[in-house]
Amino acid sequence: MVTLLLGFIFSTTIAMTAYAKRSLNDSGAMMAIMLGTIIYGAAGWFAFLYLILFFLSSTVLGRFAKEKKPSNRNGFQVFANGGLAALFAVLHFFYNSDLYYILFFLSVTISASDTWSSEIGRLSKKLPRHIFTYKVMQAGLSGGVTLLGFFGSILASIIFALLSWIVLNNFFVVLLVAGFGILGSIIDSMLGTIQVKYLNEGNVSEDRTEASEVASGVRWLSNNLVNFFANLFTILLFVVFYTGL
């Protein structure tokens, strides 16, 4: 109970600060408090700090975006990036399995790799290219990749994997976390090619308004679901690979 209380206090403090800075909206703050409390209570302070480092680094990188608009992440966005990590923290608590502990760090690393790729990629002076056809495409649309964005993915995966080494204490596993973190970002871009995109006043974007029309992609497949499924698929591939060794 003490760890849950500490998790709630720390999570609330951080979430309310993010809410005040408009990095989270009301549902985003509530979801962040819930996930933070669960992770602190189930996996301890290091796992909690690991997740917070992801959210803080993502927020800081977002400040460098050309638009420089407050992110105002909602509850679904927060869950898409931290929900699986919280699940593995709980499973580790109940079953005390090293695999679930590894999957916690992998899930956060995948989210960090994808987010850093997107945020750093926005700074590229060159237009992104379609991940399958390599044709130049409009900036800001999922499915496009840049060399700078790929560098961001690698950088995030290496940094977060090395941090996980502090508690995982297994260099081979850390290498796998880094490698599958990068793979998760690539899978996210692949899924992004079929993500729903809208036509708004003649312009294609991923923002939906009342006047929006579907321009392409699977109607129900939003960016948040792409993030969630990319994380899930990568973890399943890791489990198959890791348990088959």
Image (spheres, rainbow, N blue to C red):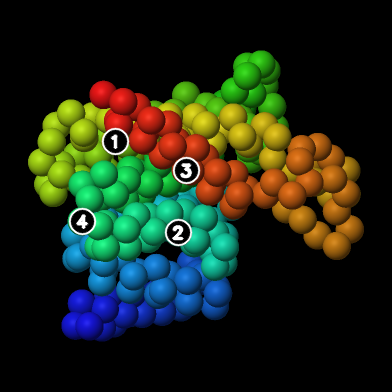
Disc 3 or disc 4, which is closer to the eye?
Answer: 4
Does the image show residue 208?
yes
Disc 1 or disc 4, which is closer to the eye?
Answer: 4
Q: Name the residue under label 2.
A: 83
Q: Earlier in the sequence, mark 2 or mark 4?
A: 2
Measure the C-alpha gap from mark 1 to mark 2. 18 Å
- Where in the figure is residue 14, as x and y percent of width and height? 34, 74
For label 4, the SS is: loop
Disc 2 or disc 4, which is closer to the eye?
Answer: 4
Q: How crowded is mark 3: few (under 14 residues within 10 Å), some or many (20 or more)?
A: many
Q: How crowded is mark 2: few (under 14 residues within 10 Å), some or many (20 or more)?
A: many
Q: What residue type is labelled 1?
A: Val
Q: What residue type is labelled 3?
A: Asn
State if disc 4 and disc 1 touch (CB < 8 Å).
Answer: no
For label 1, the SS is: helix
Q: What residue type is labelled 2?
A: Gly
Q: Which of marks 3 and 1 is nearer the N terminus?
A: 1
Task: Report the side of 121 relative to 165 (left or right).
Answer: right
- Where in the figure is residue 69, as x and y percent of width and height? 57, 60
| Mark carried by residue 231 | 3
Task: Report the side of 26 relative to 216 (left or right).
Answer: left
Q: Name the residue under label 1.
A: 177
Q: Name the residue under label 4.
A: 96
For label 2, the SS is: helix
